[in-house]
Amino acid sequence: LPGADCQERLVGASPGVALRVLRWSPTDSAAAGRRPLVFVAGWGSVFEGWRPLLTTWASRRPIIYIETREKKSAEFDFRPNVADFAMARHADDIAAVLAAIGVAPSSVDWFSSSLGATLLLDGFQRGALDGRASVMLAPNPAFKFPLWARPLLRLPLPRRGDARRE
């Protein structure tokens, strides 16, 4: 994105699960020194859908964009089932990714939508996540993995060759 350098990685979130993480660092040194914003999008939502907003923000402060485990970018070393998509698993993934990249949850601001907002609420309530401030768009009072999506869990998952796994 203009005015920022980007790093894409697959980061281990739990045993056998790796999530896609995009990190933008502003090229302006003053902006690069600001508090990072962790961005967690909603169910099925990916970076490309948020590009206009992220294009504006990435030059103004560091951004850590984490894609959750229901997205095609996630890698599983096992065949997932519905229990693998419980809200607590999603929230614990985010905490594990931040730990793996050396970012304390209490040091960040958050932006999330839909499923992303719901998993943050779960993580905050259970004490798995923390933060300075959070903007949540349309959190769900309850999120049940849709029945129509269950057959998708049996499909082979694509492997991404362009991201470094850690």
Image: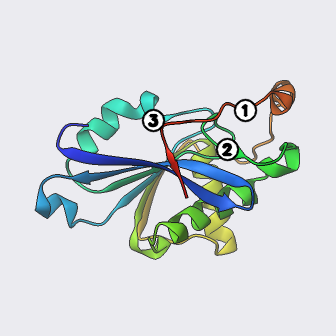
* Residue indicated by mark 3: 47
Q: What kind of residue is marked 2? A: Glu
Q: Residue at x 19, y 37 (%)?
A: 2
Residues tagged 2 and 1 counted as in contact (Cβ below 8 A): yes
Which is nearer the eye, 160 or 129?
160
Report the coloring of the rendering. rainbow
Spatial CA distance of label 2 from label 1 is 7 Å
Q: In front: mark 3 or mark 2?
A: 2
Q: How far across and how far down the image is residue 24, in percent?
A: 31, 50
How many numbered tags mark residues here?
3
The residue pinned by badge 1 equals 157
Which picture quadrant has residue 75?
top right
Kindly identify the amino acid type of the residue bearing the numbered disc 1.
Leu
Seen in the image, is 97 located left or right of residue 16? left
Vertical placement of 84 versus 49: above or below? below
Residue hosting label 2: 75
